[in-house]
Image: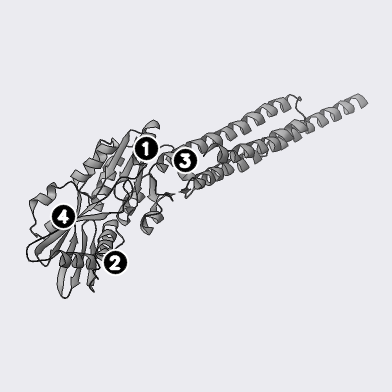
Amino acid sequence: SLVDVTGFVYLFDDWLYRGLVFLVLSCPCALVVSIPLGYFGGIGAASRLGILFKGGNYLDAITKINTVVFDKTGTLTEGSFEVRQCRTASGISERELIKMMASVENGSTHPIAKAIVNYARLQEIEPLPVAEVKELAGLGLEAMIDGTLVRVGNCRLLSRYNIGYPAELLKMADTIAVCAVGTDYAGYLLLADALKEDAKKAMDDLKMLHIDNIQILSGDKQSIVTTFAEKLGIDNAYGDLLPEGKVSHLEALRQDETKRIAFVGDGMNDAPVLALSHVGIAMGGLGSDAAIETADVVIQTDQPSKVAEAIKVGKQTRRIVWQNISLAFGVKLLVLLLGAGGVATLWEAVFADVGVALLAIMNAVSIRKTIR
């Protein structure tokens, strides 16, 4: 009958309209646009602070960090050593010692090597030509000068080759570079380094983020590392570590699956540990190319306090991304229920799609303003 046909057409139109409402609401624009934009906003805001994240996944990973391990030289300290004292063995003059040490260290980029070369330059001492230069990781350098093997590095370097040296050198709470000519001990240079201005603030900021497990790993002498750790209020400080020693220490930490570890370093020898940690953070100014390439996060300003800021940026970004997800799902679900009941119109559906997408985008863009 005509009444039945009219009723059918009315029902068809009604459900077609509701279907169109559902079709508009099913578009995932708000999620597809706002979530990656939230991470882009976080990466952009971090870069304005001098912190470079190499991907949005590291913004997420850094929010879970509960253990931070620092290298010492160049990371927590200025890394700009100055030679304060020169002591030689009998039979060799200070000028000869400085000339040999500067010659061996002339091509190295290590902060201690640069300090020795600069010291020689100030003394108007020209380095000698060297051959067969070899770097011994965590120990020092060796090279041939006029047919004689000269080694420059730490006390462990001399111990490895059974070269005798004064026992008092092991008790000194300062950084020293020792030298051996052939199989004989020749003397040492005493160097001084200082903590960075914001090193203590970096530790305080991390503790305010409830990160209490803070450690120092260093190839420097244990006495020196302990002294710096006491100044910073750090209980766990380990010195006398070769690069493989740092790797072993980090592997031991990773045995505890509850620990999420960030390692902060700057040297070429730190590259394996940066790769092993959950989040590797490199100093971009003083840092070696190997460390910067391996790291997940790069701090351009070389300030250790930026580590805490990086964690804050990650948490703020994650918070805004989840706000966008909740907003998109919440509004869409509400309008879907209203549309199923025939209450919501296409205008409400358009708002729930395009309008919510715009709100989510504006919220993502606001990261740059909230993070300073």
Residue 108, horizontal then vertical, whole percent: 29, 63
**Proximity of marks 3 and 1: CB atoms separated by less than 8 Å:** no
Numbered disc 1: secondary structure = helix
Q: Quadrant of residue 348?
A: top right
**Quadrant housing residue 206:** top left
Q: Which residue is mark 3?
A: 60
Question: What's the amino acid at mark 3?
Answer: Asp
Circle number at residue 156? 4
Q: Relative to 134, does residue 17 appear above or below in the rendering?
A: above
- Is tag 1's residue or tag 4's residue first in the polypeptide sequence? 4
Residue 150 image point, x, y percent: 16, 67
Q: Earlier in the sequence, mark 3 or mark 1?
A: 3
Q: Tag 3: Cα neighbours inside 10 Å, few (<14), some, or many (≥20)?
A: some
- Disc 1 versus disc 4: nearer the observer: 1
Front label number (3 vs 1): 1
**What residue sits right under mark 1 in the picture?**
201
The alpha-carbon separation of the residues under discs 2 and 4 comes to 21 Å
Residue at image point 47% right, 49% down: 52
Location of mark 2 (residue): 107
How far separated are the C-alphas under marks 3 and 1? 24 Å
Please tell me which of labels 2 and 1 falls first in the chain. Answer: 2
Residue type, mark 4 in image? Arg
Q: Secondary structure at mark 4?
A: helix
Q: Residue furthest bottom?
A: 146
